[in-house]
Image (cartoon, rainbow, N blue to C red):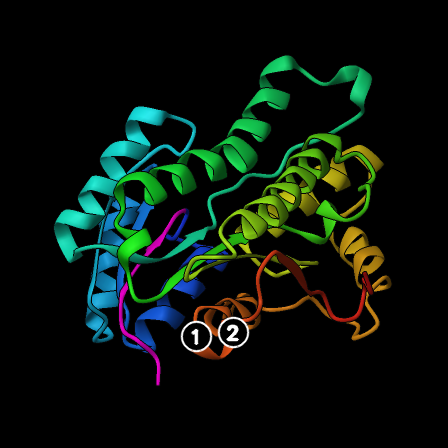
Amino acid sequence: MTTMTTALITGATSGIGLAVARDLGRRGHRVFVCARTARDVDRTVDALCAEGIDAAGTTADVRSRESVARLVAAAVDAFGPLGILVNSAGRNGGGVLADLDDDLWYDVIDTNLNGVFLVTREVLRNGGMADAPLGRIVSIASTAGKQGVLLGSPYSASKHGVLGFTRALGKELAASAVTVNAVCPGYVETPMAQRVRQGYAAAWDATEEYVQRQFEAQIPLGRYATAEEVAGLVGYLTTPLAASITGQALNVCGGMASF
């Protein structure tokens, strides 16, 4: 039997984050979502509530320690102690390394890696997870965290960092009731995927359709995964049946990666 609890999902107004919020809400969990834009948060909360999900949310910037503290406090005020954290906020970014701006590099690392650290630390400090009957931390990483991605050094570096963080924290918390895992999508059809295709199309002087064909050729299943398929694995990791899974990085990639 699943213990119903409160789930905090960052970056939850589109793509994988939204699919995770919907999946966890349908499992009966109370869902607290965040993103940087108030209109997106309000729209998402309204949509989830219209589906019968107990949802609330607020704006937050995972790059900011102060913003993260307000986020966790708001979630606890709304629904009580947190039992589930899903770190889904993230951004793409890359290019020829010699041409990269400092701001791009630091923003990718701040969003994708430092944001995971800041939110996770705050949830463990002040989110009540240590005393919850079920503690689950899941970070959305990437198969780019297991291999280098052409023209994607900032993104790959950030996601490699998330996997190292996950493995270390999983060991640290192993004696507690809190598990820590990462889900590693490959190519997933989301708004971010479209931005990635646009970036490669510009770099290669090609069409987005050409880029997509090149990507799909790398996938044994021959297609992108869906956000719902990724969310399904996240949802499983939050259940009691997954209590012995911790410190792991699990792929959802259509067979593209086998490590």
Q: Is residue 7 magenta?
A: yes
Residue 21 location in percent, x, y? 37, 63
> Residue 95 occupies which quadrant of the picture?
top right
Q: Secondary structure at mark 2?
A: helix
> Residue 196 occupies which quadrant of the picture?
top right
Residue 78 location in percent, x, y? 14, 52
Q: Secondary structure at mark 1?
A: loop
Task: Identify the residue under disc 2.
Answer: 242
Residue 97 location in percent, x, y? 79, 22
Residue type at tag 2: Ala
Q: Mark 1 near mark 2, Cβ–Cβ under 8 Å?
A: yes
Q: Residue at 28% across / 70% down in the picture?
A: 29
203 horizontally vs 111: left or right: right
Magenta span: chief secondary structure: loop
Task: Identify the residue under disc 1.
Answer: 239
Marks 1 and 2, how far apart at CA: 6 Å
How many neighbours does mark 2 have within 10 angstroms: few (below 14), some (14-19), or many (20 or more)?
Answer: few
Q: Residue at 17% across / 55% down in the picture?
A: 80
Q: Which residues are magenta?
A: 1-10
